[in-house]
Image: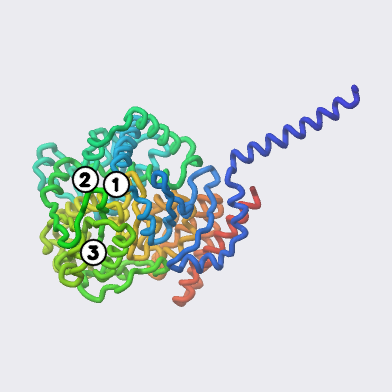
Amino acid sequence: RSRSFPFLTRVALVLVTFVAVQTINNLLFPDKENLVNLAQYDWDQLAKQASQKQQQSYPLPIRRDGFIGSPRSKMIQFGDKKCDCDLVDVDCLESIACITDNTLPQIQAGVLMRQALKESLSRVLDAPLADAYGWAPLGKTLQSLSIKVWREFLQHNQLRKGMFGHSRESFVNASSYPYCIQHSLEGKACFFNDFGAPEEYGALERDAIEASSSNNTALLANSKQEWQRLRDDPTTVTPYAYLLGFCHLSKITFHLRQHMMDIYDRRLKTIEATVGSVDDGNNVLRVALHVRRGDACSHEMTNYETHASPLGRKAQTGGLRRCYDTAVYMEALQRVQRISKKHLVVHVATDHMVSLLDEIKEHHPAVFNSMTWKYVEYPRAMFNYSAGLIPGSNYIEWAPNKALLGETAIVDIYHLSFGQVFVGHLGSRFGKLSWWQATARHNAFVPFYSVDGHSVCCDIDEACGDIAPAIVSMENCLTFSRDDSTTYITDGDTYWKIGVTVRFQAAADEVAGPEAADVIRKKEEDLRKNATTDEQYQDILPQLTQVLKKELERKREKL
């Protein structure tokens, strides 16, 4: 007995050690199996699929330190209903079938989500976030600030009392607004309220609060728990919950002052349908329609694209950006009508310099007469600013009336945020921000159809089909921005040939660490130096996909 005791002790120690190692391994790497399975996929075939409109779902790894799952999880839940949507694709209209008839309870729950966030923060700082884009269109500025605010919340559980500073900027003329003069407001602070101010409710929120019979105390407590999960343990949060959290915080950032909402109410116009009837509010579906013209296609009035662009379309850098024939949007609206079987109330926003609605009425009378149209009335002539641009420039940044154009942009984003479905341009920062705002307002997934070949997860100057393998997480999908990247440098020559490529470096860094990102950067430099033909430039992104695959496999082997 005395001799067998050490042996049994050794056996017990070995078993305890094995169990402990397995337990720690599972805690540190709960998704290891997903990463192991990654090696089973044919990445050459995957790259080809990414360039096609109809993409196949495939699993992507989760960040090693335990962050958010893939935007390609293809599971969006509306109450008791579940629908598929690949956020990397350009078409999620089929998920319209999952929109509930009575949306007021979920809108009211969204109001409480935003209230819960404000009440659960550990700190509220006085200093605003640094804004590097005072010269830029407001869509670009607000996208950048939404991303910065989200990162600061996750990292430090804090927000800013005033999201925006009071410095002057080109797209806001505070002296044009009596309220801003009276309260000494400058810059975007003229348009947007402080974080601590009570939320200014739109018509939908007011209706939802009035109709609510829920226990607000219990809902508020549950909402605070959701925010805490997002901060403390993101691996327990679904991609859908991550999306909702991000969009709610973007809406808190986009907190319009009452005088701006009054401008919206005064300028809002409605053209009622002349065909069909609306029995009740549950038979109505609101659609946000964003028709991009103006500097998006060098102020051309003809030669628009006659078909929506697939996901595999080239990056739309500078002069390669495209406008689309009105028929493209009308076909999408008719498809929404067929899927939903509801009366459509279309919230239309455009920078077209002639009346878009007159064009629809003349050339698409069946569509025009069967739907209700809501638009914000501004003189169309104000969008004809090309004659006042400096020589050699086509862009709105140099428009002589850009301060007034800034007002129209903000009011139109607010207008589009009432849509339960989005049809338009997700390659546009303006369109993407509008979709974020709509998602928060409805506290639900907003089905979309993007005509420009760009998805929720992709920027206008990326070749979205080729870049899709590098969209490795919801964090990457929603917060990657080439403009805000100081770690990954975009090469000018490559940019004009094939668009932004640095997402591959960001993906490698996120999943496998900075050494992997450096491997991809060096590979890209070598490919760029040796590229002399268009075909060789076009081959850069597929080759970077292969390098990313190898780095992920190396990480798998290390695990």
111 lies above or below 49: above
Instruction: Decide if residue 435 is in sight here.
Output: yes
Percent of width and height locating residue 336: 31, 60
Given this view, does label 1 or label 2 mark the residue nearer the observer?
Answer: 2
Quick one: 471 or 336, which is closer to the camera?
336
Dots 1, 2 in contact, CB < 8 A: yes
Mark 1 / mark 2, whichever is N-terminal: 1
Q: Residues within 10 Å of mark 2 (few under 14, many from 20)?
A: many
Q: Amino acid at mark 2?
A: Lys
Quadrant of the image occupied by residue 270: bottom left
What crowding class fits label 3: few (fewer than 14 Cα within 10 Å), some (14-19), or many (20 or more)? some
Residue 424 visible to an observer of this rendering: no
- For disc 3, the marked residue is 395
Q: Is residue 527 left or right of residue 148?
A: right
Q: Position of residue 216 (x, y in %)?
A: 32, 30
Depth check, front residue: 24 or 309: 309
> For the point 64% across and 40% down, which residue is it?
25
Q: Which residue is mark 1?
A: 131
Q: Tell me the residue at 41%/62% (across/down).
A: 500
